[in-house]
Image (spheres, coloured by chain):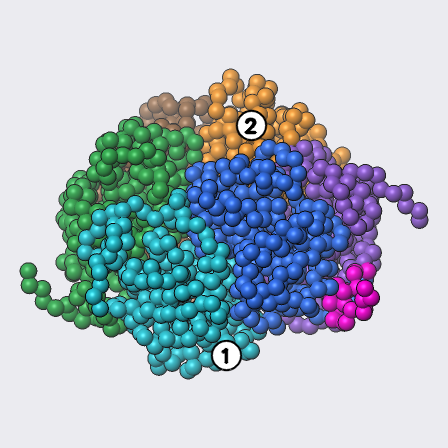
Chain colours: A green, B cyan, C blue, D purple, E orange, F brown
Amino acid sequence: MRLLIVNPNTTEAVTKRLVDAASGVASPATTISGLTAPRGFPYISNRAEAQIGGAIALEMLAERHAQVDACIIGAFGDPGLLGARTLFDIPVIGMSEASMLTACMLGRQFAIITFAEALANWYRDCVGSNGLENRCASIRGLRTRFASIAGVQEQMEEELIRLANLAVAEDGADVIILAGAPLAGLAQRAARLIQVPVVDPISAAVKQAEAIFALAPRIPAAGSFRRPDPKETMGLGDCLGARITHRDPMPVTR
Amino acid sequence: MRLLIVNPNTTEAVTKRLVDAASGVASPATTISGLTAPRGFPYISNRAEAQIGGAIALEMLAERHAQVDACIIGAFGDPGLLGARTLFDIPVIGMSEASMLTACMLGRQFAIITFAEALANWYRDCVGSNGLENRCASIRGLRTRFASIAGVQEQMEEELIRLANLAVAEDGADVIILAGAPLAGLAQRAARLIQVPVVDPISAAVKQAEAIFALAPRIPAAGSFRRPDPKETMGLGDCLGARITHRDPMPVTR
Amino acid sequence: MRLLIVNPNTTEAVTKRLVDAASGVASPATTISGLTAPRGFPYISNRAEAQIGGAIALEMLAERHAQVDACIIGAFGDPGLLGARTLFDIPVIGMSEASMLTACMLGRQFAIITFAEALANWYRDCVGSNGLENRCASIRGLRTRFASIAGVQEQMEEELIRLANLAVAEDGADVIILAGAPLAGLAQRAARLIQVPVVDPISAAVKQAEAIFALAPRIPAAGSFRRPDPKETMGLGDCLGARITHRDPMPVTR
Amino acid sequence: MRLLIVNPNTTEAVTKRLVDAASGVASPATTISGLTAPRGFPYISNRAEAQIGGAIALEMLAERHAQVDACIIGAFGDPGLLGARTLFDIPVIGMSEASMLTACMLGRQFAIITFAEALANWYRDCVGSNGLENRCASIRGLRTRFASIAGVQEQMEEELIRLANLAVAEDGADVIILAGAPLAGLAQRAARLIQVPVVDPISAAVKQAEAIFALAPRIPAAGSFRRPDPKETMGLGDCLGARITHRDPMPVTR
Amino acid sequence: MRLLIVNPNTTEAVTKRLVDAASGVASPATTISGLTAPRGFPYISNRAEAQIGGAIALEMLAERHAQVDACIIGAFGDPGLLGARTLFDIPVIGMSEASMLTACMLGRQFAIITFAEALANWYRDCVGSNGLENRCASIRGLRTRFASIAGVQEQMEEELIRLANLAVAEDGADVIILAGAPLAGLAQRAARLIQVPVVDPISAAVKQAEAIFALAPRIPAAGSFRRPDPKETMGLGDCLGARITHRDPMPVTR
Amino acid sequence: MRLLIVNPNTTEAVTKRLVDAASGVASPATTISGLTAPRGFPYISNRAEAQIGGAIALEMLAERHAQVDACIIGAFGDPGLLGARTLFDIPVIGMSEASMLTACMLGRQFAIITFAEALANWYRDCVGSNGLENRCASIRGLRTRFASIAGVQEQMEEELIRLANLAVAEDGADVIILAGAPLAGLAQRAARLIQVPVVDPISAAVKQAEAIFALAPRIPAAGSFRRPDPKETMGLGDCLGARITHRDPMPVTR
């Protein structure tokens, strides 16, 4: 299976981190590739950026979907996920969705631990739009400042682990999700130090993408994820416009 | 108050219809203007188009927010609403949000009537993200085909009214919301023929925008709608990028 | 628009405070009047008093509804609101309802701050009967005693502001509602000191009453707010009995 | 135990029917008495009447609570229930509350069958305020007109039974509640003809009142049902005012 | 009424404690008997043990149901309750169910206090399967170790009372449930020291069993608690197998 | 990975069908084995049988868990799932759980289609205990009788497909789950004829088991799925007792 990680952020290092973590858990038959957003933000961290980054993710997928078998939206909060699932025929998996659904098989209640408390309400939207409020014990984030997003998981490792164990002891969490692409890979290092199972969103997403691909679900001909009928568009990227209009994209010369 | 209706669709006729309906209910002190999306879709009708149209709405607002006092996102489903509320300092109101909250003051349960049944699940997302599931009696849409979106409210008026009265009789609705910009203005004509109060989303949005503007709420310095700290962006429209980076946009020469 | 504030309490000073606050935000075209309960309690502060005060509010409205265009129930908890909406043809708005719905347009989650912690569970009923549990971050009230209800907002201002900011920092509130008629007007003074938008219930109720009046919804001929058929009554106040029996009240001589 | 049925309606025949049905299931040690509202409505059938009737119920209880050991509010919708529980020291039980909680021990989902479909939304409020939405399979009421409330259970018996069996077959009900004082006693006659257990609200209320009385719970000194501190009142019935002010009522001479 | 307490644990002392507490509140016409599990665990304290203990409860009931009029499952968490209600014709009541439903008539929100914090998440399942999440203010358990389950209520009495009062002061509880068979009887001693009504699960269960028995609900001929059609079984206890196969059990010789 | 399908029913043919369907989707590295319940029921179809069958599943797992890497509970309704997850160190996956979580990645709302309408309320419990009520559009089952459970999927194929398409058209389902072990494998044949993606529970369970195994979550040392401390048991199967007592089982001689 050719699995594409669409990173809706512009930071190559994050894409690389995601691809590395993904490769670590992928089945031998899975080939991982990554795609970094050509425009947008170094890191998506609020509802506005998720709105824009999600649209960019659709542009990216429009260009590449035909060359892959499945795709992961590589940012917590799953920007663009439902739109992508509407437009494209391949399985599209979100990191938050995959990690929460996976966590449901490891305990009754999960907690989400992330690197900034300011993300909590936005993440809560995401829990809600998945209808999983009553599986979520709490969302906790760092209150302290850190030097850089790139280094946050190393710099703040101890504090993140403390928050995770607090969520277990105080909030009744049976499972911990370490959320946010900048924390990709931390789960593995921290597993020993957190008292309950830890879900790494990119890892969960890889396994869920493989699962869905293997199940080979049919493309919907009805329901709210049926591919919309052709529609004229104006001023969208060529590939995205072509996909929506049901026409071939212009040949690209690069 | 200068009130801007941001139509995230590319159809001028819809903008005009919205502006006309809005002008009919606006207070004398309110000046209504409309802005049609320079790119995108003639009509937003699914989650993918809402993702893209919402991002376009942010671009549009980035260009114009400084010249107005409040703004309405002129499409049911409220594409870009929470993002806009995050980025800009003026009140931003969504048509679905405003119509549902208004309906809550007119009865216990509202029903949403729209022009295509296929919209129901996506509208349900919107009810859910407003946390109003238990105020919503039902969502009903036309099952029959119609000639054009532009003329749907005239052509299908009788059937839409029948659906509304069914929602009252069968689903327990105390209030009807006639949803979707193409139905703007129908409420007034249909009011006599529907047994319960009818909410016209654009009208509700105008009154709610006036209400919020008059209350002059402070700009949040905390919480999840605090304007994000400056952040570098890449390849976004100049005005949107400038807003996000906290810098002045380039002077526009047109 | 002639807007009546029905204060279901017997304290003239509270009515005056409400009328003053209301006048401060009303549109030029709105004339505010107040009516103090002729019997009942100096202040409604539990479910029993709300039951009785709500019935008194209906008596008050029965006497005055024909002379006004819309009405506000001037007590948090909205005593008598749904009954009034059932019996009378004019828009009737509740202060808690209006403040919560307004808050929904200013953020994802609101917190209610009030002057006595003992009110929390009863207010929670009110959040619940509006179906807004998942928009409510928390309800916090003063634990300390204060000298008099009349002076509580001045005397306890600092502590109320501290609670509000705690609700932002600890409970994830994006908006604060300062609840209870005795706090009417505080919002304005406190706005600067609370980190997020603050909703003043009487102000919100005025703007919502104006909004609903302007939308001119039809009087329901079906649904659960249709005016009930005539029914004999016994021993109710003359005006209330007349309204319920669909007859003219006795001429009053005063 | 002296058990008082407070009928907040003015129809003696309904009180008698309730007392008769209650006597049929009461324990030998229970003495049933009834009290008919001295003012109000022949039958409470909407939110406005419940507001007023509930306040009248409090007046009635204020006069009689000291002479009894427990009390039932004898109208579906439980008008005045929470207020009564706040003010008085004896157990107060509601007919809807008791029937729904009892039904919960007889199956997973109950349906409420009543004599007029127009009652459904108001009854739904009651289900909601008890937090039992997810135990309620449906609420169904007669759509046809009937000659008189007094004779509805006889006249419409067949149709009511048909609705009950429909709720079982179509809505997944495991238990049926025959709701509304005018249906008191029907349960017994209909039991054979309805496929699942049937709960008669007044019977359930009697047994729950006996249960609570026997458990002899302490009078709360905290929480939201603690008896409020003394408070001045104005113009309330003497006994009710006295109860609220914590003083002895005036000696009655009759 | 002959009321059987099925203790799905193997500890005779717990059965005795339950029978004693039950006898203290039972009506004169009620005869209490107890049955201790012949196999299983000294005390059920997690989901695995509830699964097994619940099946054992069914075996016990299969042997004895014909000799009694009603039965109580004597362990918090109600192991086997719904299965028993499916298989047998007599009323079957659960201790947690009965205590929560009873608590609902004593206040808006209850808290569950138990002897080990580790039980909280499992008890939460039970609140959820009863659909009572929004009536439950909190679940609090001892964090400290105690010498023996048999003596926990005496040894830890003070701390349990402190937790109960904390639930009132911090969590908004109007009622306290002292949960877990090892705490049976404590409610009575502690009532004076806890500020709100306290529900003792075994006592509540006795009164609810008497209530349901007195109401004499019909045996369901439809719905999800209709007794299943005869089915072959293999290797179950003789009485249980006989009940499921609708045949007479083998004569027992002991 | 050695993956065991624990069939808590006694019907070998069902085990075989499950193993066959599972083998069809398993990764090359997965070895599937099946285990049929040595006692119990030919088919589990209500809450009582799930209680007993779940306990039997624990006995079966106690005997075999050490020889496998992961396990699936092979009956819809997931009997014994949470207990198994508490007691054993290997991943344990339920067929209903896995199919519902998988369905969540294929659409917003799923419907469950099964072979007998009588199963609906019990399946609803399962949806509820997974906290997925708001993802479930409907549960529909055959109302007509069929000759045998073994042949139901062939005999009733057309009707099952009709129900599935009805759930899409009428209930808003985006995904269909064909539930119940007797339908294992039907999904594949029916996929072409059902308009939306179809989830086959055993297939979903296999892929989820592989996913969880690959993620190698740590064994919980806290939370409500921590393995309980050693506890004495009485009269349980030797292996199950040994597992609970933390001792070695007796050597088996067979």
Closer-to-camera residue (F68/A25):
A25
Q: Secondary structure at mark 1?
A: helix
Q: Which mark is residue B189?
A: 1
Q: Residue B40 lies in magenta, yes or no?
A: no
Q: Residue at x 31, y 70 (%)?
A: B36
Q: Which residues are magenta?
A: C235-254
Residue A244's spot in the image, x, y percent? Answer: 23, 68
Quarter of the image with the N terminus of chain B in it: bottom left
Q: Residue at x 84, y 39 (%)?
A: D248
Q: Which residue is mark 2?
A: E163
Q: Would you say residue D248 is visible in this rendering?
A: yes
Q: Residue at x 58, y 57 (%)?
A: C23
Q: Which mark is residue F193?
A: none
Q: Secondary structure at mark 2?
A: helix
Closer-to-camera residue (F132/E34):
F132
Disc 2 versus disc 1: nearer the observer: 1
Mark 1: amino acid: Arg
User: Badge 2 local density, few (<14 within 10 Å), some, or many (20+)?
Assistant: many
Quarter of the image with the C terminus of chain B in it: bottom left
